[in-house]
Image (spheres, rainbow, N blue to C red):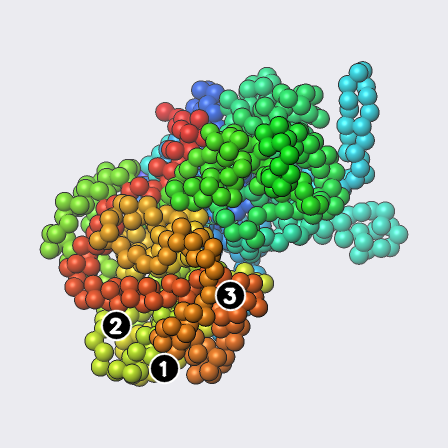
Amino acid sequence: MQKEKILSLLSEKCMQSFGCDLDEATKQQTYRAVCLVVRDLLVQTRNDFCSRYEKQQAKQVYYMSMEFLVGTSLHNNLYNLGLEDSFRAALADLNVDLDDLYEIEPDAGLGNGGLGRLASCYMDAMSSLHIPATGFSLRYEFGIFKQKIIDGWQMEFPDNWLDMGDVWLIPRKEDAVEVKFGGQVHEWMQDGKLKIEQYDYTPVLAVPYDMFISGYDSGAVNKLVLWSAKSPSNMDMNAFSRGDYVKAIEQNAMAEAISKVLYPADDHVEGKILRLKQQYLFVSASLQSIVKNHLKHFDSLDSLPQKAAIHINDTHPALCVPELLRILLDDYGYDWDRAWDICQNTLAYTNHTVMSEALERWPEYLFREQLPRIYQLVAEINRRLVNQLNTVYPGDLAKIEYMAVIANNEVRMANLCLACCHKVNGVSKLHSDILKDSIFHDYYHIAPDKFTNVTNGIAYRRWLCQSNPKLTEKLREWIGDGFLHDANALEKLMKYYDKANVLQDLQKIKRYNKEVLCNYIARSNGINVDPNSIFDVQIKRLHEYKRQLLNVLHIMHLYCVIKENPNLDIPPRTFIFAAKASAGYFMAKQVIRLIDAVSKLVNSDPAVREKVKVVFLEDYKVSLAEIIIPAADISEQISIAGKEASGTGNMKLMINGAVTLGTLDGANVEIHEQVGDDNIFLFGLTAPEVEELWKKGYNPVEYYNGNLELRRVIDMLTSGVLGSRFDEIAKSLLTNSYGAADAYMTLADFDSYVRKQEEVGRTYLDKRKFFNMSLVNIAKAGLFSADRAVTEYADDIWQVKGIK
Ligand code: AZC
């Protein structure tokens, strides 16, 4: 597009929206005008795309997820449309730097971490692959909280993203649907048919907002539909006229509370009524709209499984099972068997974690009270399931109870999905095997064909091409443009494996990206970091199983070693952390406090700080990850084996040339398969060894007593040298007052980790060797593209195809 054309579109937008000339617009107004112009372009492409797939009566994907961690959109959209350079040039005429506009955009943080970001990567990939898809979620008024560290303690602040982020959302008030909560169910016979009605319920309106999702160099634009809760009547006028003003607005506020805020917990659930309401609101509204859309194009719901693949992203949208059943039975008069058959063939489910605290279960009474009709259906699903299980596992009451949807006065959402969906998948080979062999083994036994694996993938055009332009430019020079469409083409880089000038260029690019990050760190933390040091990065949610603690204990060990031997010859290191802890997760907050204390100790000690620096970056989010990842040398993926379902940060870091230091957990196993023993730093127990050790009886105190280095750092936790004491952490490692002692085997893996870290240091001294490794990681990262993952879902689970 010509820049004159862009300028004229911008002027028009500016005048329409703000009543001012473009050259008088504030930066915020210019930003909005740019977004609105881009949005118009997306609308045009979308209309075209819709008419094509409607004409072909193509099957669509409906991706149901409580979370989409979108991040920012302007850069991604301009990049995908191939318009970044022309917009940059047009704005330069106005003395506006496009990068400054990028910085204005708040992240749409409608997710916690891996699961939500994966959903966004898959939306991007589906658009790039021309697969017709709609994502459904909630339009949270407040996304994931903003994090500040005050005196070492994490504080949470509201994330008012809609202030500027609303520019991407198009409200469709006319398409609002009603969702019913509470009340009673009335059943009666009419003309020989059972009729069912819910009455005395509380209605809540779900209003859809559309956000368009572009694909790379693609004629496809999909959309994310975000539901916002509203009270159907603005005020209860009866209460109002009685003078009860507060009561009058209460109903309003209660309804609107449903989409107010994202629950900030990752791999952990809170059994709160509000959360159940959130789930039902978005599930019911989405299914009503899917069914309505289907009936616009086809005459009955018989063909739903042929035209719609509805995907349940973790159990949060598991209510899809009874809600779709309800619609078919109560609203469209299907009989049970036929309705169940449609549900089975339409729905599929992905599991994202084996952590037991993340398995969703609802108290039966609460579920029944809030969703009386849905409860009846779940009870009937359970009755039929238990009958069937009695024939498969006769008399095995314990097994049947384990597999039941309702047991012990709880409704279990994973079992609901397992009982119904035609496919169930884990997110890495190891994780899918664990599902089959252990947590879902009994279901696997009765329906082995249901189970499959789709290893996660990332939208690498965001994580490599957009966030690491220097590397992308060089890659194009070396291996051509093929990788922009097909990530497997990155493998061509292997021919430069030992080419000195390529390795030097890789080193220069890394160095440049590190300088960019150094500037950020200087601004945000006031710490001067040496860009020649190894950037050793652990960025992810803070969780005990991810073992940020193991990383800190190693830093404390290094501190002791350097204090003992100030002339120690090791390459300087900068340890970089970024992590949010769930607001109520005490231990996770203690670990942040520890990182903060260790960073103060290390960074202020003249004998140590030339060799080691520790930086904790506040408020980890997509846009911050985009700055850190291109600058990383070492990617810390150090969870206890068997607990990290896949990880996706590991893939983002790898494709940017960081070398993984990790356990054989999640997708690290497949990263290892790709790069081979020589291009990864592996340590620690394997998943079977962890199991074995638990069986044998794990006693962390033996490790503490048997390893002086370990003992020294554990003792530091309680000695006060860190400025304050970390008794709870020490206790959690050595005694079982907080559940099992050292439940994540940090002590068992400590020695192996420390030795591997020494090897990392030695290897880095040989720059050529290190950048050989880095090159191989980039070259072999193609497998982890979301295009590959989505293609597997499309072929094996959804049976959908891209549109020509
Ligand atoms: C995460 C997993 O912990 C992570 O390993 C995986 O890469 C990611 O999903 C995407 O599959 N799981 C969650 O975030 N789970 C929940 C329930 O929040």
Note whether ligand 1 is within 8 Å of mark 2.
Answer: no
Rendering coords of residue 235 (x, y %): 77, 48
Q: Is residue 424 visible?
A: yes
Q: Secondary structure at mark 2?
A: loop
Going from N to C along the chain, the mark reached first, 3 or 2, is 2
Question: Which residue position is annotated with label 3?
Answer: 741
Q: Quadrant of the N terminus?
A: top left
What's the residue at 36%, 24% (across, down)? 804
Query: Of the residues under marks 1 and 3, which one precedes in the sequence?
Result: 1
| Viewer-proximal residue among 651 and 234 | 651
Count neighbours of disc 2 (C-alpha within 10 A) and say few if under 14, some if 14 to 19, many if 20 or more. some
Q: Nearer the viewer, residue 146 or 582?
A: 582
Question: From the viewer's perspective, is 95 left or right of 119?
Answer: left
Please name the amino acid that badge 3 sits on.
Answer: Ala
Q: Which residue is mark 2?
A: 572
Q: Position of residue 71 (x, y in %)?
A: 45, 51
Determine the CA span between mark 2 and mark 1.
Answer: 15 Å
Q: Secondary structure at mark 1?
A: loop
Please identify, in this view, whether the residue under mark 1 or under mark 3 is nearer the observer.
Answer: 3
Residue type at numbered disc 1: Ser
Mark 3 secondary-structure assignment: loop
Q: Which residue is mark 1?
A: 604
